Amino acid sequence: MTITRTDVKLLIPFLLFVILGLWGSYSFPFIESHKAFTLSFKWFIVPSLILGVIYSYYSVFLRGPQQAKWRKVVGLFTLTLIFALLFLRSFQGYLVLCNAYIGKQEELAIRGTVHQLHYPKKKKPLNTYAIVVGFNNKEQSIKLDVPSNGYIIGQVFERKMRKGSLGLLYSF
């Protein structure tokens, strides 16, 4: 299979978009990434699906091998989901960067106790550790991605954080 100019024209923007978006997702050690993903899903699910269909259609029907139609349809559906999730995660990274570098930033001192731990069983690339920090009134809590699994339930969490223009908490 040879790589054509059209392949390069589609591949380079895709790789740049995804790599920079993923970098944005993981650029802060403390971040409310669950909230960022919710915003990303609300605002960018339709563009992600459209881009997913475009890239998967090109991959399956224009560049893929000759196969039965039903295989191509299954491939189109599967690749659309994969591409859409990649684009959605990349959009999340761009939202995190916009939150931190564009607009009004508010300095906050967060103090609460760790109520829940969300640690992966095995540490794999791109896995994150998360904690749920509750405050005195027990009704409010925040879920933060943290850089390590050095937290225990009941531990006091105290950190200076910033609330960005999109309402996401983050810290360097």
Image: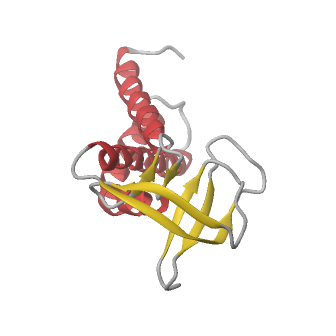
Judge whether 136 appears above or below 27 on screen.
below
Residue 4 % position (x, y): 41, 15
- Residue 132 in view: yes
Residue 124 located left or right of residue 171: right
- Identify which residue is drawn at 55% across, 43% down: 68
Number of labelled discs? 0
Residue 55 located left or right of residue 145: left
- Residue 62 in view: no
Residue most toward the left?
103
Residue 66 % position (x, y): 53, 32
Q: For the N terminus, which image quadrant?
A: top right
Q: Nearer the viewer, residue 29 or 128?
A: 29
- Identify which residue is drawn at 51% across, 67% down: 111
Residue 99 % position (x, y): 32, 50
Residue 131 % position (x, y): 61, 64
- Identify which residue is drawn at 34% across, 21% down: 9
